[in-house]
Amino acid sequence: MGMMKTEASLDEKAIVAAAEKALSDIAAIRGEVSKVIFGQESVVENTILAVLSGGHALLVGVPGLAKTRLVTTLGEVLGLAANRIQFTPDLMPSDILGSEVMDQDDSGRRSFRFVKGPVFAQLLMADEINRASPRTQSALLQSMQEYHITIAGQRYDLPAPFHVLATQNPLEQEGTYPLPEAQLDRFLLQVDVNYPELAAERQILLETTGLGETRPEAVINAQRLIEIQTLVRQMPVSDTVVDAILALVRSARPGQGNASTDKNVAWGPGPRAGQAMMLCARARALYEGRLAPSLDDIFALAEPILQHRMALTFAARAEGMSVRDVIAGLVKQAKG
């Protein structure tokens, strides 16, 4: 019995030591990113949380709010091999995945060779993802979920870690194809990128219009990121927090006894939302220097995790209600 206790405490000590090392790495990551991205703390935090949790993020905002710059900066700071794809209506699946080309050797024998596309990166920026056709969007779907692609019956594994950070412009709906629910659900978080505060915008003007621009430096590498992602999955979660996640996610589904949801929500989040919340709550605790997630983490993450996994009824939309209003109401109820 005593032996088991010693092993458990050793295990606990090892996790605490690993967490302290991860905390200093995360602080360094935040410091480097803040040299280039001014203000937008919650946007930076949620995007980093998605990566620390091993998932993908959808950044939604009008043009010119440094969404692309944030993704590029993160690639450099995390030491990841990054690629960018500008999504357009004429983009084909092969432009993302790659294609087979015919080679001929010296003896005249011909054979096919696979040329890898830009999806073979550790950090893939999918710029204006809703501009591509559903066929092309679905080509990205398999890679986001299964971390490999299949071409002509042959499987090709993607590099580890693999993250998709996609951007979407909410204004220009002409020539766009809304992302299907199945694809939206693959994104761990939806990060809303709003206009910067006055002080941050002043800093942007001063820092970005001179001769020299600050370049971020790599703080960690891909291997270290995988170690931190593994640590996030090992962090303990109390029953109270697990129950709060289940209660919140289930309350967002119609037919579960919540009168407001039954009235306003057409369809709600599936189990993947709860999984996302478990991972992101742990990552958020670590990001803020704590060793275990709390109820505050759940309430803070409710909007970015749930909003793209729910749809309102026609009546609720006609009344001018938004998904955010519904989630805010559910969080208020949960807080009691």
Image: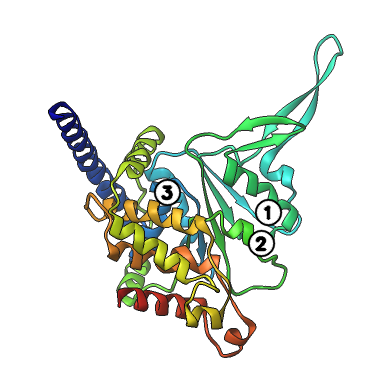
The residue where tag 1 is placed is 137
User: Residue 310: x and y, percent?
Assistant: 55, 69
Instruction: Looking at the image, tell me whether mark 1 or mark 3 is earlier in sequence order.
Output: 3
Question: Which residue of the protein is positioned furthest toward the bottom in this rendering?
Answer: 319
The answer to whether any part of residue 181 appears in the image is yes
Relative placement, left or right, of 270 versus 100 is left
**Front residue of 319 and 119:** 319
The residue where tag 2 is placed is 180
Instruction: Classify mark 3: helix, strand or loop.
Output: helix
The amino acid at mark 3 is Val
Instruction: Looking at the image, tell me whether mark 3 or mark 2 is earlier in sequence order.
Output: 3
**C-alpha gap between disc 3 and disc 2:** 22 Å
Q: Is residue 122 above or below residue 111?
A: below
Q: Is residue 174 above or below residue 37?
A: below
**Front residue of 96 and 254:** 254
The residue where tag 3 is placed is 51
Number of the front mark, 2 or 1: 2
Quarter of the view holding residue 143: top right
**C-alpha gap between disc 2 and disc 1:** 9 Å
